[in-house]
Amino acid sequence: MSDKKAQLTVDGKTIDLPVLSGNTGPDVIDVRSLVAQGYFTYDPGFMSTASCESAITYIDGENGVLLHRGYPIEQLAEKSDFLELCFLLLNGELPNAEEKTKFENDVTMHTMVNEAMVRLFRGFHHDAHPMAMMCGAVGALSAFYHDSLDITDPEHREISALRLIAKIPTIAAMCYKHHIGQPFMYPNNKLSFAENFLHMMFGTPCDEPNVNPVLARAMDKIFLLHADHEQNASTSTVRLAGSSGANPFACIASGITALWGPAHGGANEAVLTMLAEIGSVENIDTFVAKAKDKNDPFRLMGFGHRVYKNFDPRAKVMKVACDEVLAELGLENDPLLAIAKRLEQIALEDEYFIQRKLYPNVDFYSGIIMKAIGIPTDMFTVIFATGRTVGWIAHWAEMISGSYKIGRPRQLYTGYTPRDYQPVEER
């Protein structure tokens, strides 16, 4: 707590409020005492409200900064990998060589799911949306793993974290395989995390594992860059569910449902939908003009960001991976991807976009990469959830291991004041 004080004056009465300071970022006015004075604060969308204290991720949207446990995302993306980042988010420090090997082995040993999950998937209709299946399957994990549901036990929290990180890629691949009518692929413990995921997605029992290392690196980058993003809608949902004492599998399932919303996890899918709507490079100028027209509802998806008022730091890394994937697959001339590349060029050169800082964001490039790899658009949010799981479980564990209260947002009531009940014949 800093020495600063804020004062709120209401009806001539002054209320002193403490001002809290974090290690970096804006100071926070502590309004917890207001309820005793008969007041709540009103902040739809929590745009100006800190709902928790956290030491995991820091974002400075004005300057395009994203730190995980203090490490810049650019350094982690260049020098680290997804599983090492998982260890960092969960434990607060990067692992040494021995810890890294043990953590990777521990995750690998949990990649299989109970065989009864196969019967669960068979209950879904063949054209069920992959996110619908993922919501159900992840929630169902708590029905299979009763031995790690004591949220007060640190060992139970650790084993649950390992199980979720390891099994959700398997579940994600099962969602895809069921969707297209192919047999499920068991995990291959000889492969890396990203290689194994692509093997389960695109491999068949007829063939030996054969994963392109360039695509595996790009997939690892997608997981890493989506691993955590502070108190977004889905992470806040996980924390709110967790504050009730719900088991970790149920909490992560709640995060998946929040992520399913098109305003949150569907952004990269919206990019591909937009590219398809534009249709060809010849139509780009028309659609750019529509985007600039404030009276036209058309929006260019994948440009700008709600949090980042400058360049999305994750986009720089994803752009490099995108270029590598397109070159590896020889897709530089793909019609849809040609539209994307031209839009990227316009956004980086056109004064309209530059002045408004509407730069390509991480969703723009990740959507292009996944399209190039062959992942259908209705799987994009499933991939997002697979990477974000570690962030969700890290925030859940941080909350559960500390001091917390059950979430109970207040409201500004605008309904009827008390009135008398009228018998039905008198209404």
Image: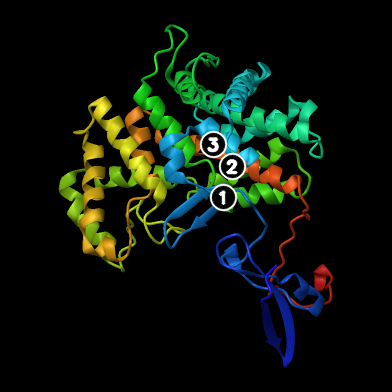
* Circle 2: element type: helix
Say what secondary structure mark 3 lies in: helix
Question: For the residues marked 2 and 3, what is the alpha-carbon distance in whole angstroms?
Answer: 10 Å
Measuring 31% from the left and 68% from the top, which residue is drawn there? 294
- 1 vs 2, front mark: 1
240 displayed left or right of 332: right
Q: Point out the frontmost of discs 2 and 3.
A: 3
* Horizontal side of residue 99 vs 67, given as left or right: right
Question: Residue 224 has which mark?
Answer: none
Q: CA distance from mark 3 to mark 1?
A: 12 Å
Q: Is residue 119 above or below residue 205?
A: below
Would you name the residue on which mark 2 appears?
391
Question: Mark 1, residues whose alpha carbon is within 10 Å: few (<14), some, or many (≥20)?
Answer: some
Q: Nearer the viewer, residue 84 or 298?
A: 84
Q: CA distance from mark 1 to mark 2?
A: 9 Å
Mark carried by residue 85: 3
Looking at the rendered structure, the kind of residue marked 2 is Gly
Q: Are marks 1 and 2 in contact (CB under 8 Å)?
A: yes
Decide if residue 421 is in sight here: yes
Mark positioned earlier in the residue sequence (3 or 1): 1
Pointer 1 residue: 57
Disc 3 marks a residue whose amino acid type is Leu
Q: Are marks 3 and 1 in contact (CB under 8 Å)?
A: no
- The answer to whether residue 131 shows anywhere in this view is no
> Residue 38: where, in percent of width, then height?
79, 78
Quarter of the image for the N terminus: give it: bottom right
Neighbours of disc 2 within 10 Å: few (<14), some (14-19), many (20+): many
Q: Residue furthest left?
A: 282
Circles 2 and 3: CB atoms closer than 8 Å: no
Disc nearer the start of the sequence (2/3): 3
